[in-house]
Amino acid sequence: MPLHSFFPSLLFLLLAVTQSFAAEPPQNSSPGTEKFRILFNGNDLSGWKGVDGFWSVSQGAIVGQTTPENPTKGNTFLVWQDGEVADFEFRCKVRFEGNNSGVQYRSNIVDADRFVLAGYQADLHPSQNYFGMMYGEKFADRGIIATRGQKIQIQSDGEKQVLAQLPSSEQLTDTQWNDLRIVAVGNRIIHQVNGVTTVDVTDDHPKALHKGVLGLQLHAGPAMKVEFRNLLLRNLDAESGKQLVRKLSESATTPSKDDAAANPQSPDAKKKWLTSAPEAQWIWSKQSTKNQKRFFRKSFSLAAAAKSARLYTTCDNHVKIWINGQQVGQSDAWQEPVEADVAKQLKVGENVIAIEGQNDEGVAALVLKMTAELANQTETTVITDASWQIAESVTDGWQTGATDAATWATGTLHVAGKLGVGPWNVPNYTASGGNNDPLNPRHIITPPGFVIDRLYEVPKSEGSWVCITTDANGGFYASDQADKGLFHITLADGQTKVEPIVVKDPENGQVLSGAQGLLWAFDSLWVHRNGGHLYRVTDSDQDGKLDTAERYPSKTGGGEHGNHALILTEDGKGIYMVGGNHAPMGNIASKRVQSWDEDFLLPRMWDARGHARGLMAPGGWVTRLDPETKKQELICIGFRNEYDVALNRFGDMFTFDADMEWDMGMPWYRPTRICQVVSGGDYGWRSGSGKWRPYFEDSLPPVVDIGPGSPTGVASGIGAAFPTKYQEALYALDWTFGTIYAVHMTPNGAGYSGESEPFVYGTPLPVTDAVVGSDGHFYFAVGGRGADSAFFRVRYVGDQSTAAPATNANDASAKARQTRRMLEAFHGHVDAKAIETAWPYLASEDRFIRAAARVAIESQPVAQWADRVLSESDLQTKITSAVALARLGDASHQGPLLNSLLAMEPTELSEMQLLGLLRAYELTFIRLGKPSEEQRKQVIAELDSLLPNQSSDVNRELVTILVYLRSPGVIDKAMKLITDGSEPVIPDWEELASRNQGYGASINKMRENPPPSQEIALAFELRNMATGWTLSQRRAYFEFLNRAAKASGGASYPGFLENMRTESLETCSNEERAALQDITGEDFNPVPDFEISPPKGPGKKWKLDEALAAASGKPNFERGRSLFFAAECGKCHRLAGLGGGVGPDLTSIPNKFDQRYVVEAIVHPSKDISDQYGSTNVLVDSGQVVTGIVVDKGDKIEVYPIKATDKPVVVSKDEIESMEPAAVSQMPEGLLDALSQEEIRDLIAYLMSAGNANDRRYQK
């Protein structure tokens, strides 16, 4: 029977919460088939005209801008050139600042030179009453036709009749992206902003317009900027127009069906609870004065114990709240309410809520709502209203009601209105209270013609989803990253159903969760666990419920760098398994990669901050599993941390591999990149400085470099109901920068070249995984590391063709792919035909064919082809086969192979061939042994004259080899290249950096102050030259390092340079050291150049809610920066370029986590521990246990204790009995306990601002 896997008793049912264009269609019903014309292509102003100098395109948006130097004398418009609009629906995203703007429609051109229009306008105005209103621009003196919230009819004599007042309490923010919708059908016109109708006008005015042009407004007056994107238009016939108007009219006046209460964690559900009956009132005393303090109290009774109790309260400006004498919260900003579950503070019988409120100046008010769910299945709700007691002063014990009631008054309160009225609205749940809902689709950007639906907000009880896959029936599976379980998702009948899957590990009885790979295949759900095993989950009794898990042979470990994705193989007979660089491989029955090692000629430098020290090849891997035999075949290796893979329509596999962001600025930094995953490939990740260059002959190049980021899911566009180019695209998800890239690839022989396009992005939008559903829509999840999680859908509503791509089976690339696969068939096993078949392809100019041929040869016994290498006459074949022999041969091949390479004439080679020859030399020395003295001199004579070369890549390899060979001339030549310098290559990452202010700031610093990476590469190799230096060369070398240290780079950049200096100084004589003291005293990682003052306190044992309340209010940047170091955060953590290197860099936390998450991580540091920074319990043979972060030091380890001021403990590896992960975070509890309320505020603000003194928090 078809497996649906449902559990009615545990079913969670949730209607759609938010949609980018609400009400049409319902968010998680089957979307409609309406198609819109795309009015703006996202690249240029084709199809639009306006006054020169005011309009442009930037980052996919139309931008209109005036400045004090370039004002407009009157309102001017960018006018759409392709006809008039009559009955239509128009949609766009818009944001603006400085002045109001608008969208003009059914308008006439009254000044063609100045692009002035007259007619209807959907007004975009910072005033809430005018935002989305209807304005008559130069339109029969009509002016404001309808303000926001009005449903009106205009008679034939021009008189207005207000028919209804529409909901208009939602706070709209001009500087955020807003979704604008205009529907005009005959005399009926409706405006919507963010899915809410702002005006509904029936216009029978004698001068009403029924058709005209469409335009975008720039307003005269103060300097302003307006941005429009995703402009869509569809013409409406009489019937479709009538139906749409009816739907919009009904949705504007009738509350939509909403089961959001099923997810009480969602912002919409919380807001609904807050504004539903009984409705809380804003209260205060009759008069509001500056610095006024008032005390409030309310008694109530509970008939049974409270199972849960939601509390919400805030006060303009400060609030402290107690329940039965226990303080449960505090806030110093009305925009940041106290929200908590206070069930533990409640009791059966009489209870007392007591509040201290204080006003700074201006209007003052307090609001509270608490709903307790009781054990007797009833609810009790307490709200602020006129019945509360108020006092101007209190005595001890007032919080419990134990004092004289005579000091309290009742019936003297002033009620300012219901929760939801201005100026406060619903703090934290409307825009004036902050961007409470960053995952709202209106904040998410797509290309023209695409729209976003948020289908489900994941409650905390269901964790934070990091992995999704489709089932066999149009549904989905999802997994929490931690222990909240697996879930099945069904979209049907306008509802999103989410049901838990409770299946236990057969070995330990734990409920399966923590999948970083999910796949429905072979009538089973396959689960690849984070740090765990591979499981096959089935329905053993065929009752429609998954109930049995079978553990497959596999390994554990690696955490976020461990076991990852699962996908079905291109032939449908197996499963590809993915593992990151910390994931041990399972038992491999066969392997297509014949050999791997570190394979760098000169000594590696481990990461300067200790990351992945001691971790060796193979790095991240892909294997193929046979579900029946349970055996795995190794396909390829050499990734850093590839989370996912996907197949294109030709059956080729691709992945999105991670960078090591700490390496930025160093020559071995490899940005995140799309790689074609091929049989036998080694993609060259090696720890520290050991990463292979992409031109290495024994590796393969990327399809395209992306830039900094944190790769997660990868999905193919196959099956998407998208325009053709998006069906062909590969989708790559970046968690850090909240971006889903569409990678458009062009076949290039047997490989591909590519370009990346930001397809979906938001700030923050921690995307984790994506799939194309059976309905042709694109689905993705956000979450990870406990972050707020949600499930989204991307639909295409544009008018471009969604026809399937054409099949060109006979083109050159198709033939090249066929050749590559023919050669790959020889990988991993002996075949008598392999050598003769593959040998001619060793000469191919196509690197993927050449590599496939080399691996086919390497899979055969070396004795059968070694002599052929030595006698080969074709240059490219000689180079490729020499690399193979160096990798698979033995010491007996070293001499003949070197002589064969020396017989080649390097000057006759292309750059690609020369790099191949140099790599062959390197591998010969690495794997087959050092050259004899005679050979050493011969190779120097062969290569020395090639340096310098026009190619920086060739120079790097020449310096590497000549340093290894101790060439007497290499220092002089390399130092000339270093001192002459080259123009730094500044990566085009400005737009990417804008999507993460914290992490992006570091990237922009590097772009503004770029490091001399090419020269560092040469200096890095020269550090190995112990002799042959003159004093002037030594001085020039250290002067260069000093200059390089002043540039900006990643977190390990200064440490790498300091380590280079240290190693280079070790090769200096005592006399040289004495002579160089004036320049070698430079501090490469300077301590803060500002005063660090200790905390003043008074401190206390801070609870989470108390610390959260203390973190509000206007902070002091200097005090926060000082406290970062005084409170010992900076001992372990780096922020904004300053601090220690034991813990993770905190610069990017504002984009990844909200303030509550950060405060909770400090108060309860062991709740969520990153597997990359966890402590280890080290048991030594004396019986002592040493706990801390372990750094490998060769034959010993250094253990950095929890107390940051303690020195690391050095332990010989011979003394170690065992090493186990510690359950307690390296970060100690109580870090805040020495701080006062104000100091907590300043420290948390410093963290959340990423150390940026210009952050908005300091501008309040």
Image: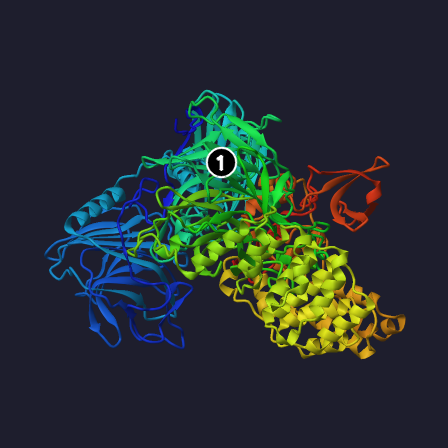
What residue occupies the far right of the structure in this picture? Answer: 1070
Q: Is residue 812 above or below residue 1038?
A: above
Task: Specify whether residue 285 is in view.
Answer: no
Q: Does residue 1104 appear left or right of residue 1038 in this picture?
A: left
* Residue at figure coordinates x 56%, y 33% from the top left: 629
Q: Depth check: 734 or 789 in front?
A: 734
Q: Can you see residue 500?
A: yes
Displayed quadrant of residue 913: bottom right
Specify the color scheme.
Answer: rainbow
Name the foreground residue: 578 vs 820. Answer: 820
Rendered location of residue 977, percent (x, y): 69, 77
751 over 162 or under it: above or below = below
Relative to 716, say whether 270 is above or below. above
Task: Give the structural element (helix, strand or loop) at label 1.
Answer: strand
Decide: is 952 above or below 132: below
Viewer-closest of 585 and 1044? 585
Q: Residue 1 vs residue 1165: left or right?
A: left
Pointer 1 local density, CA inside 10 Å: few below 14, some 14–19, many at least 20: many
Q: For the point 19% across and 62% down, which residue is it?
A: 142
Q: Quadrant of the N terminus?
A: top left
What is the x, y in percent for residue 368? 46, 38
Q: Quadrant of residue 602?
A: bottom right
Q: State how many labels appear.
A: 1
> Between 475 and 462, which is closer to the camera in this rendering?
475
Residue 972: horizontal and vertical position, in percent? 76, 78
Q: Which residue is mark 1?
A: 311
Question: Where does the image place residue 1204, in percent across and percent down from the top left?
Answer: 75, 49
Task: Check disc 1 and give the amino acid type.
Answer: Leu
